[in-house]
Image (cartoon, coloured by chain):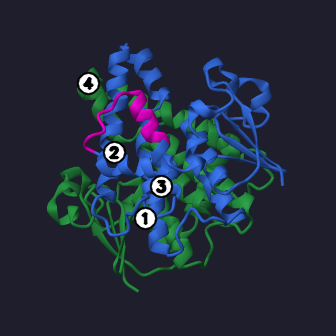
Chain colours: A blue, B green
Amino acid sequence: MSLTLHGFFRSSAAFRVRIALNLKGLPHEQVSVNLFAGAQHEPAYRAINPQGIVPSLVDGDAVLNQSLAILEYLEERFPQPPLLPTDAAARARVRAMALNVACEIHPLASLKPQSYLEREFGASQAQRDDWARYWMGRGFEAFEARLAGHPQTGSFCHGDTPTFADLCLVPQMFNARLLQLDLSPYPTMVRIEQSCLALPAFEQALPANQPDAV
Amino acid sequence: MSLTLHGFFRSSAAFRVRIALNLKGLPHEQVSVNLFAGAQHEPAYRAINPQGIVPSLVDGDAVLNQSLAILEYLEERFPQPPLLPTDAAARARVRAMALNVACEIHPLASLKPQSYLEREFGASQAQRDDWARYWMGRGFEAFEARLAGHPQTGSFCHGDTPTFADLCLVPQMFNARLLQLDLSPYPTMVRIEQSCLALPAFEQALPANQPDAV
């Protein structure tokens, strides 16, 4: 087995995969793709991923991308410890929370649409930040509603061990803090984030703890 | 078994689930949530889905949402015919294509960000359409690149039977045609769309063929 993660310390999608690799105790090499310098568009990385997005996970001959597809792959190939529950409806609950972040918050709050706003509508930095906070806020309301008072919410998003939902939650909370989003309306998310960061697998995956952090 | 799909003829996320139910031959009831009239925010639907988004699939006591989570649930509960390949790397390829649509195209091209653009930046209808076409175009370039020349691309996105990737592709192509996106740069996608629409399961899931179509 030889796993190589091509990522970047500030990529929240790579952050999700780092946590999974740590939780499953999988030895892996990390290759930094400097998104700040546009390295994702250079031939060296395009050979790995023609689309020029991170993360990519290379496992022997297999080159994988899209962080949630990578999480599913890791779960199938290396089932222990499980990051999805066993019951089908519970698995759907966890996946819905993960998709809540990956489909509803992250794409809108990310830098790409902000660049479009600047280019086509002359959006200021304050307007770009407002845009990102708006989508985070709407998504967080939905995420908090999924958690609060639900009988399957535990010390983590689903029960008392981490799942895909937590792997998506923590990086998104990190981004929200960067943008100084008011987190007081989301007490369950804040509590679960604390449970997660108490685990070395999460803490070691934090952007500041990566070798390419600047 | 009693399955009820809460959706809307024009929802492309509901469209994905309709195709899956048809391919698996699962009898189900459809309940229309009229998004044009704001029915997703009314108490009757909020009782099913507090977030007010479609689709939701009700299976006995389980209330599921997020279309890709629903697809995974259906695959686990009703494995035949399979909509994912068996090999882990192949499953990751299919899921990455599905996520390419669900995370990179649909959230940005959808109506919600367009409403924000209109409200906060005074975007005209033409500017809103340009925005949607821009994100579709970028996403389609990536999707076509995943397909073209790949040894596992067949008459469908992966091999010669439909998978999650096709279930996401066809609704997104439908939306692209509504916006008159030039599809000539994406010949593989157009060819696969034709393979899909030749199957009754896809054809019967088209918006125009739903009882609530207007």
Residue occupied by mark 2: A140
Residue at 67% in and 67% down: B161
Pointer 3: what residue? A165
**Residue ID at (49%, 34%):** B135
Q: Which residue is mark 1?
A: A93
In percent of width and height, residue B144 lies at 66, 42
Q: Quadrant of the C terminus of chain A?
A: top right
Task: For marks 1 and 3, give the CA distance.
Answer: 9 Å
Image spot of residue A63 (x, y percent): 76, 47
Residue positioned 74% across, 58% down in the render: B89
Chain ID for label 1? A
Q: To which chain does the residue with label 3 belong?
A: A
Amino acid found under the numbered disc labelled 2: Phe
Magenta stretch bounds: A171-185
Earlier residue among tags 1 and 2:
1
Is residue A146 in sight in this rendering? yes
The mark lying in front, picked from 2 and 4, is: 2
Q: Is residue B103 left or right of residue A36?
A: left
Q: Chain of mark 4?
A: B
**Residues tagged 2 and 4 counted as in contact (Cβ below 8 A):** no
Q: CA distance from mark 1 to mark 2?
A: 16 Å
Q: Is residue B53 left or right of residue A93?
A: left
